[in-house]
Image (cartoon, rainbow, N blue to C red):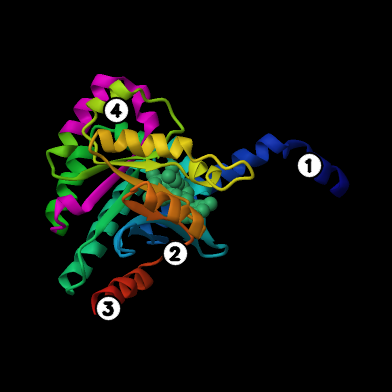
Amino acid sequence: VKEQGKNNYLFFTSEMNESIVRRTTMEKQLAIALEQEQLTLFYQPQVEASTGKIAGFEALVRWNMPERGLISPLEFIPLAEETGMIIQLGEWVLRRACEQHKRWIDEGLMPVIIAVNISMKQFEDDSLFETIRHILIETKLPPDLLELEITESIGLQGADQVINKLNRLKTLGVRIAIDDFGTGYSSLHYLQKLPIDTLKIDKSFIRDMISVTPDISIVHSIIRLAHSLQLDVLAEGVEVVSQLEMLAALKCERLQGYLFSRPIPAEEARALLLRQKLD
Ligand code: C2E
Ligand code: CA
Ligand code: CA
Ligand code: CA
């Protein structure tokens, strides 16, 4: 009898079933994580290419799971998007990033840009404008220090709608960056109409600059394009000095990547700002 029970169990736990179980478990755990403050923000420095100074930080969420330790956002952001939990999670990230940075400014540390990722689902949600407006009022962070990183895929929504939404967000005084630029499809015409401040070149192009058959032509074109539209350029995934040198020569404004620092806990980010102040 025991043997049979075991077989039945195995029969019903097909691979598909198992993944559904795992998903619902994770979904419940994520809801708990939000309540119990199991989420934490890491910060990755964005360096000013001309001076080597910290010009900003990108806030990157981590899930500190009681049994597993730090979990990558790649493991739970897609789930949070599917379940709609990204709205709540994204609001938490925005509030925490703004609060934390305002505290550093109040301590006398140099104000820098704080970049926050906004997922497609969040961007589509009608409450985003009010959420950000409230958070800026609550935290008193100067709006021009908040940079919203939005991916090119928002364009799928329909150009006019996207432009209207971005224009409305811009009235709050925040900065807008297009993340992972070059991986999606945006025409020059479309880009020209968007009220954006920064183009963030996707790390795949930065990697290709130093591949076996190095190719800097795409990066060169993107930077030229951005500058012709009066946009700042930020390169992500900068890992080696030769990339830094090429990007600096191309007058890329900001650089981000393991060469400078991995994403670090808030305390370490604060220490970097403190050291920069004392230098
Ligand atoms: P992303 O926005 O493109 O963020 C950059 C990712 O590249 C980060 O991974 C960062 O740790 C990694 N990275 C930084 N420097 C280098 C480098 O030199 N080389 C390489 N190979 N990678 C580098 P992370 O933190 O695992 O985040 C992964 C993705 O998860 C992010 O990609 C973003 O799409 C998403 N994500 C993270 N935090 C949030 C959040 O708060 N909200 C939303 N909606 N998405 C988030
Ligand atoms: Ca990003
Ligand atoms: Ca990116
Ligand atoms: Ca991304």
Name the disc covering residue 261, or none.
Answer: 2
In the picture of the structure, the residue carrying the numbered disc 3 is 279
Estimate the spatial distance between the alpha carbons at disc 4 and disc 1, rounded to whole Å.
Answer: 53 Å
Residue 192 position in % (x across, y down): 25, 27
Is residue 176 depicted above or below 256 in this figure? Answer: above
Can residue 30 be seen by looking at this rendering? Answer: no
In the picture of the structure, the residue carrying the numbered disc 1 is 10
Q: Is residue 193 magenta?
A: no
Residue 263 position in % (x across, y down): 43, 61
Amino acid type of disc 3?
Asp
Name the disc covering residue 175, or none.
Answer: none
Image quadrant for the C terminus? bottom left
In the picture of the structure, the residue carrying the numbered disc 4 is 191
Q: Are marks 3 and 2 in contact (CB under 8 Å)?
A: no
Amino acid type of disc 4?
Leu
**Crowding at label 1, few (<14), some or many (≥20) Cα neighbours within 10 Å?**
few
Q: What is the magenta range?
A: 140-167
* Mark 3 or mark 4: whose residue is earlier in sequence: 4
Establish whether ligand 1 lies closer than 8 Å to the Cβ of label 1: no
